Structure formats: C-alpha cells, structure tokens
Amino acid sequence: MSIVKGKEMKTIAIGAVAAIAAATLVSGGISQTVRAAEVGKTQVVPTSYSVPYSGAAYSNVPADYVKKEYKVKFVGQDQSTVNDLKGEEAAELASQNLWRIFHAELSGQTLEVTYHPISTTNLRATWAVHIKINDTLSYDFALDAVTGENQLVAKRIYHKADIREGMDKTLLKDSQKYQALAKAATEKYQFVSGKVTSVEYISQGFQKNEIGAKNSDITLQVKSDKGEAAQLTFSRYNKELLSVEYNGWLQEAESYQKWIEQEETNQMTNILITDEVIKEVQEKGSPIEIKE
C-alpha cells in the first residue's frame, strides 16, 4: 500500500475527478466520492440559495428537442424540500441535456431519479438521474437541486472490441487532437462562460463492464476568461464525447482536496522509535504502544 501526499493528492482530487465520478456512478443514482467524504465539521451551504432556479432550469431547451415519453422512478429515501426543483423537473432537464449533447433518445426508457440533500458530506442539494439503456450503454446526469445548474452529464458506453488497457504514452507529449475536440465541444455547447483560454491534458482511463465490453478515455480541462472550468472526457477508441464535469462540480472537488490536505496535516504524527525500543520488542515480543 502506498501513501499519497501533497501535490500528488491534489492531482487525484482535482485532476482525476472524472475517474472518481465514473467509478461511483451507479444504477441508483450518483454518489460522488468528492461528496462522499466529510468536507468539514460544520455546515457549508445554507438550505436555500440566493439564486432562484426559476428561469434557469428551462432557459436552454434544444431547438430540435421534442418532449420524450419516459417513466420517472424515484430511488432512495431522501425527500426534496420546497426550495428544490421537483424530481420530474430534474428528469426533464436530464432528457433535454442528454438530447442536446448526445442526441440520446429516451422515449420508452425509465429515468431513475435520486435526491441527495445538503449535509456535511454534500455541499449542495443534488438531483441525480440514471438511465440504463442496455448492457453496454447508460446515461447519467446531475444538477444542483435548487438553481438547476448542471453538474455532470455522462454517456457510459462500452464496446465489444479489442481495446488496449494501457495508457497511450504518445498523448503525454502531444494531445492536440483531443484538445481541439474539447475546445470545439465547449464552444458549441457553452460548457463554460466566456472565451476558452486554455485546454490542458489531465489523465487517461480504461473501463471494462460486467460482460467484458471495454472503452478507454482521455480527460482534458478547459478554462475560460471568466474564471470557469470544465472537464471533458473523450473515448480514445472512437473520439466521441463521454462526459462533461461542470464548473460547480470541479469547485466541490477542490473543496474536497483542501479538506484532504487539512486532514493530512492534522493526522500527521512524528514517531521516533529508538534502538532500545526495537530491542525490547524483539526480546520480549511486546507490542509498541502509541498514545495520542
């Protein structure tokens, strides 16, 4: 077992947030690792925000979108509040966004909707929507339950093909073709506000599902002149867009990273074991007792 510290931990918490999210999205909804650890000892976000969701929720309906005939299934025990969008509204926003970005046809499908309330482990109340199409394709969508702000949209697709598990080392030196894809997609769908100022390589990944179908990916981070960022993941198999993590999602990952660093500092203890102590343990078989 290795111990990760300092800058390495920052890379895990922020740079690889796409991989974290991908590993924790399940059929019952979404449970972000960046939310699943305690982010602080006190409440961070109030139960209602100063920004209302009215207007924001339906301001960007795709021009070619037609209301889909789907079923909504509520999953989990937590209940939304009067400040939150209704679950049916969250489902419709998922349908609109999945159509806009992936052209996902959800008519006849079941949208599993899960509410995650604000808590010390969840910085914002969230609606998560999961749709399983078949054994090799599913979709996930998450948004702020109050403001309607998108947090994540994802297409989980696997291919029955010969896809290498390893990293493509050439992309460490030159990922320009994927950077161009990320910039073009961001400008087309306005994943960030303002003008794109930079695109940075973040990581590579590989997935394999229960039936052995596979996919490999690459994640890049796009930043704008308005100070916003988004992380886009593309398939290395066929270059299709797989997921988008929006600015709010990444900000929460950064908060989680800061918490990890603080916890690391708080729990770090210097222990000096002398030769005499080691000799005593060897001779008597006595355990070393460490008192906090």
Image (spheres, rainbow, N blue to C red):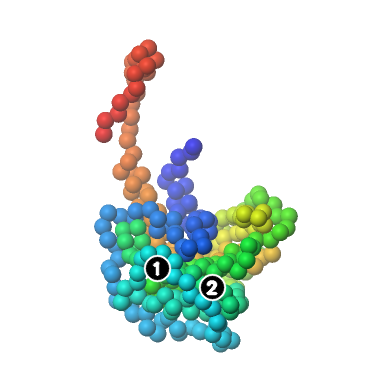
Label total for image: 2
- In-front residue for pair 260/288: 288
Q: Amino acid at mark 1?
A: Tyr
Task: Give the percent coordinates (x, y) of residue 209.
Answer: 62, 56
Residue at 47% across, 47% down? 8
The answer to whether one can see residue 246 in this image is no
The answer to whether one can see residue 250 in this image is yes
Residue pointed to by mark 2: 110
Left or right for 292, reference 182: left
Q: Quadrant of the C terminus?
A: top left
Residue pointed to by mark 1: 115
Q: Residues within 10 Å of mark 2 (few under 14, many from 20)?
A: some
Q: How far is mark 2 from mark 1, CA to CA?
A: 16 Å
Q: Is residue 292 above or below residue 236?
A: above
The label nearer to you, 2 versus 1, is 2
Task: Give the percent coordinates (x, y) of residue 144.
Answer: 40, 71
Q: Amino acid at mark 2?
A: Thr
Residue at 33% across, 33% down? 270
**Which numbered tag is attached to residue 62?**
none
